[in-house]
Amino acid sequence: MYAVIVGSIVDEQTFSGIGYEMPEGIPFPVSGMAEVYFDVYDGMDFLADFRHVRFEGLGSAVVLQTVSLALIAHFETFNIGGCVFQAAAGGDVDIGRRVTLEEIYDYMLGLKSEPRYNVRTGLPKKAPRPLIPDELCAYKTITKGRACYVVLQ
């Protein structure tokens, strides 16, 4: 089971205090931002563990697409200016992953489009398609060993 937690950030001071940064030259949205946490739910004691858990028969792309659709619905329902989330880099977060969490998010948001190759065969893989609509723009900054993502309307 997965958990998606969406919190409200209503001002830039709170946003910056958490450690996020707006893209250069872009003001903090007047209608605020949503901060998103996404993790495997394995009881309240393990929430925010952000460890990789493999589920047989359940592709991560299906899960990420479902979360993406839920966030887009949140944008439309609450008329927020954008959302922010983080991806830890390396360490426990990437144990058991063939692709780092940061790279998954980069492809999912359309920030990375380099061709990928099968490790065993060397053959090119199908390019992943971004999971956000064209009217949303994604930005990324790296701070203190984590990737911070801002998605704006």
Image (cartoon, grey):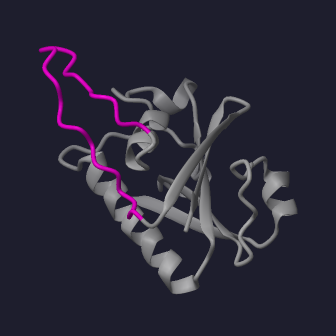
Q: Residue furthest bottom?
A: 77
The stretch drawn in magenta includes residue 113 = yes
Could you say which quadrant of the image residue 79 lies in?
Answer: bottom right
Residue at the (16%, 14%) spot, across then down: 122
Q: Position of residue 62 (x, y in %)?
A: 26, 55
Asked if residue 127 is positioned above or below residue 132 in the image, the reply reads above
Q: Position of residue 39 (x, y in %)?
A: 50, 52
Residue at the (40%, 60%) spot, across then down: 132
Quadrant position of the C terminus in the picture: bottom right
Residue at the (58%, 48%) spot, across then down: 139
Nearer the observer, 100 or 29? 29
Could you say which quadrant of the image residue 56 lies in?
Answer: top left
Quadrant position of the N terminus in the picture: bottom left
Asked if residue 7 is positioned above or below residue 125 in the image, the reply reads below
Asked if residue 58 is positioned above or below residue 10 in the image, the reply reads above
Q: Which residues make up the magenta segment? A: 112-134
Q: Position of residue 97 (x, y in %)?
A: 37, 29
Nearer the observer, 56 or 136? 136
Counting the numbered discs, the total is 0
Q: Position of residue 119 (x, y in %)?
A: 22, 16
Residue at the (57%, 65%) spot, across then down: 5
Would you say the magenta stretch is mainly helix, strand or loop? loop
Instruction: Judge left or right: residue 42 versus residue 113.
Output: right
Q: Residue furthest front?
A: 25
Nearer the observer, 47 or 36? 36
Instruction: Judge left or right: residue 59 versus residue 7.
Output: left
